Amino acid sequence: MQPSASTPRVTAILVAANGSDHLDRTLNALAAQTRPPEGLVVVDVGSTDGSTSELSFGGSAQLSRIAAGRPFGEAVRHGEQVAPRAEAGDGVDEWLWLLGHDNSPTPGTLAALLGAVEIAPSVAIAGPKLVNVDDPARIAAFGESMTRMGRSITLVQDELDQGQHDRHTDVLGVSAGGMLVRRSVWNSLGGFDPALPDVDAALDFSVRARLAGHRVAVVPEARATSAGPIEEFGRAKVSERRRVRMHRQAQLHRRMTYSSAGVLWIHWLTLLPFALGRAIGHLVAKHPAAVGGELAAAFAVAFGGGVGRARKTLAANRKLGWAAIEPLRISWRRVHEHRTTSRDVELARVEDAPIARASFLADGGIWVVLAAAVLSVVTLFPLLGSPALTGGGLLPLSTDVGDLWRNVGFGWHSLGTGFTGPSDPFAAVVAVLGSITFWSPSTSVVVVMLLSFPLAALGAWAAVRKVTTRTWVPVIGAVLYTVAPALVGAVTTGHLGAVIAHVLLPWLFLTLVEAHRSWASASGAALLFAVIAASAPSLLPVLLIGWLVALVVGWRHAHRRVFVPVPAAVLFVPLVLAQIARGNPLAVFADPGVPSATPAPSALQLAIGQPLPDWNGWLSAVAPLGLGDAVLPIVMAVLALPVAASAVGAVLGHRWSLAGTALVAALLGYATAFGATHLAVTGVGSTTTIVWPGSALSVFALAIVVAACIGVDTVPRAAPVVGLVATVFAAVAVAPAFAAFYLDRAAIQPTSGRVLSAYVNAEAQANPDVGTLVVQPQTDGSLAVALERGQGSTLDDQSTLDATALSLSRSGSRLATLAGNLASRSGYDPEPALRDLGVSFVLLDDAPADPEARAVHDRAAGAIGQDARFTSIGETTNGSLFHYEGAVDRTSTGSAAAKATHVLYLVVIGVVFGAAALLAVPTAPRRRRATSNVLEADEPATTFDEERDE
């Protein structure tokens, strides 16, 4: 440490790198200093803009040039080496003043810096207050610090300078621009770390100075300009990927440098795993540009070297422990405050959020999702831990992922007696789900059911946030959409497709609204459009109308939205052509999955959003009181009144056009649900059943919730009361439906994943094509018959092409004839049919509680049991099982042409959906100047100069 009485001698080192916009002003500012530096070294870093071509100095000023691309710290090191040194014993206290070409100091800056170090000799590094070059009243940077994990933080940034931080002078670090550092300290510490060429070099140098026993301070009276952060110095543009790599690499390098020897190897081993996890987090958070930077930073630190040299330099000069600088580190609480402030500033600047927006974490979004998760656990508790589900519209999936994909597309399908044709588009959705939990494909269905409530809440929260301004209104929308009868009805009846459609509809709304802005949103809308249409084909008219309206409204950007239905078309065209060829085009709208009987609700029940005629379970709950038919319609209508009134009242507010559009969408959803109750195309036993109206009611529910939330958002004073009443009434209306599992009214139930008996399963292990003739007694005295292969029918091999057949095929007629003769005594010889169809087992299902069904069951059991060709295996959980002792033929698996067509179709699906998925990966948004203070959903399509072609 130099004595305070020594004479200070300052050498300014000015680094210039293509700084033609700022260099002249900075040189003039140096000349205007009230206390000028004794020497000046201008280091030109390969400038090509002519900024230093005409510079000539004499006396104590000189110009030196180094190659382009060299970092700021290396340029300063070069300048220090060429700067003249004082003779030993002269009693001179030498200082270096580090400046960039954009760091134009005010006239009294150097005097203020020297004054600060003269009155505090322990201060070896002093930094000025950096202000914005275009707005000197705004602070660009004032002091630096870091967290315990090495993340750097600028203490004051992008704030209006009102002197509010001037009393805080002792800091952990200062910025490189304008730094005044004692020359002896610079040399003893080795200057800036060469492994930190872009960012954090000044912070690291300050930390090493602190650990060497020196102090670091900021001087509020000293001011210099800054045109941007250090990583942009001398660069025309820094990509998001490169910026992430710079900062993350600097953080990891310092973490490795500062850590103790005992944990150094732990940090090194976790570099790549943590980088991979953070990369996945960036993708989830819609920051794909940061993925490459994150991985590159980890690899650079892990294998690039530099850590060993930095640790040696630190150890050679360290005199104090880390406890000495602990008070100057930043706490996690302050990190959170810093993030919140930065987010608020960013939101204020971006056109996409010109008004206050609800925060998912701060304004209740996360709490409503967690509450929905708790509701799911309580409601679906019997499903927890189950590997598969059955009942209603569900069956377990195939146990092999390869079988899932063999059932996708045009080709041979082994359902029943087998046929060649297109699969349901929903088979592709099921295959993707099963592939996610490849070790147990059926588990994916259980997961979808369990997550349906929280995911619906999350989607509705995001959708309502898009169209409202009050931060608590999205919570109301999330609750209303989550407790919608369409969702709980679909879950308890096993309509998996309807559940998926309900969860994804809000996200389709969001991406379709944003499709005019980017290809990422348009491609995301295309994927969601396809998945929803495949899961709930009855929504095809609604989806197409919504697409056409969006196309017309956003005609300036129709080139993005016009391709939205293409992936869905690829899935549906083969099935549509097949149904048209059979003369049954309306069968395209049939529900995928296991055909199950659905009772038709009334028009009033549909208007209240109920897909079943049980008044959300209240009918059986109040049946002992004898008030169901008379009172329930009135009570349920009253409970629905607050939501309906809010939705209709929304058209009286200033956002009437948006509310009106939502009401039109609700009317369209209602009309579709009403039409579904009058369309019976799917056979169930000896009867047909209607299309599930719950999918269309999900559209109705989303539109009504959006309109109601707009209405609540625009109510002047009574908004909280209206929202609370609407939510409570809606919850009361649907309460019994959530108790379906506890009241034994749910159609679905957990299962082990086995469809047929263990005996048949064991046989199927050796012969996957073994056939089981399943005979089911019906309440009208008839028999329903099905032929199942291997371990039994699964959800992925179900086909609406089979369920909506207008007449029996030749093999189907033969199957019916075989079953009818087996179930009664006759002279019919079943052996040829049993051999040709590959039937080795006959399963006679238990009869329902009906006299006619019981009679036909007993007759069939007697006939088969007395036939010497069959051996009784005994009773199983499904019914009575018999084994046919004769030889059977091996069944067909389709022609070579069918197999080739199947492979070709999978390739087409892969190309189309792969391209859409790649385009759907979002990129970083570009800031655009705010032009209005309106909601995003109210904005017209942007003009061509505002486009982003991600």
Image (tube, rainbow, N blue to C red):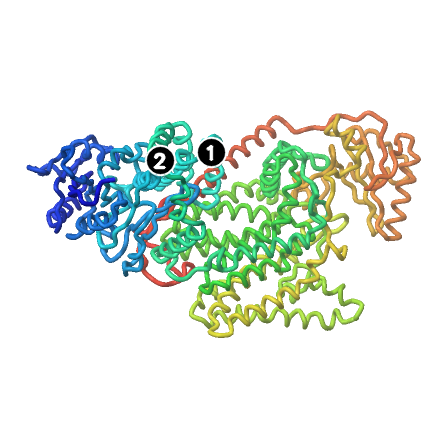
Residue at mark 2 to residue at mark 1: CA–CA distance: 22 Å
Q: Residue at x 38, y 37 (%)?
A: 254
Asked where in the image residue 305 lies, by quadrant, the reply is top left
- Image marks 2 and 1: residues in contact by CB distance under 8 Å: no
Q: Residues within 10 Å of mark 2 (few under 14, many from 20)?
A: some
* Mark before the other along the chain sequence, 2 or 1: 1
Name the image quarter holding the N terminus. top left
Q: Which mark is residue 267?
A: 1
Tell which tag, 2 or 1, sits nearer the viewer. Answer: 2
Q: Residues within 10 Å of mark 1 (few under 14, many from 20)?
A: some
Q: State left or right for residue 553 relative to residue 139.
A: right
Could you say where residue 576 lies in the image, as x and y percent from the top left?
A: 58, 44
Tell which of 297 and 772 is nearer to you: 297
Could you say where residue 614 lies in the image, as x and y percent from the top left?
A: 72, 62
Is residue 308 among the parts visible in the rendering? yes
Name the image quarter holding the C terminus. top left
Tell which of 53 and 805 is nearer to you: 53
Name, please, the residue furthest toward the bottom: 717
Say above or below: 534 vs 674: above
Tell which of 65 and 463 is nearer to you: 65
Q: Which mark is residue 394?
A: none
Q: Amino acid at mark 2?
A: Arg
Q: Which residue is mark 2?
A: 318
Figure label count: 2
Could you say where residue 763 lies in the image, as x and y percent from the top left?
A: 78, 29
Element marked by disc 2: loop
Asked where in the image residue 98 lies, by quadrant, the reply is top left
Element marked by disc 1: helix
Is residue 83 among the parts visible in the rendering? no
Q: State left or right for residue 759 relative to residue 897.
A: right
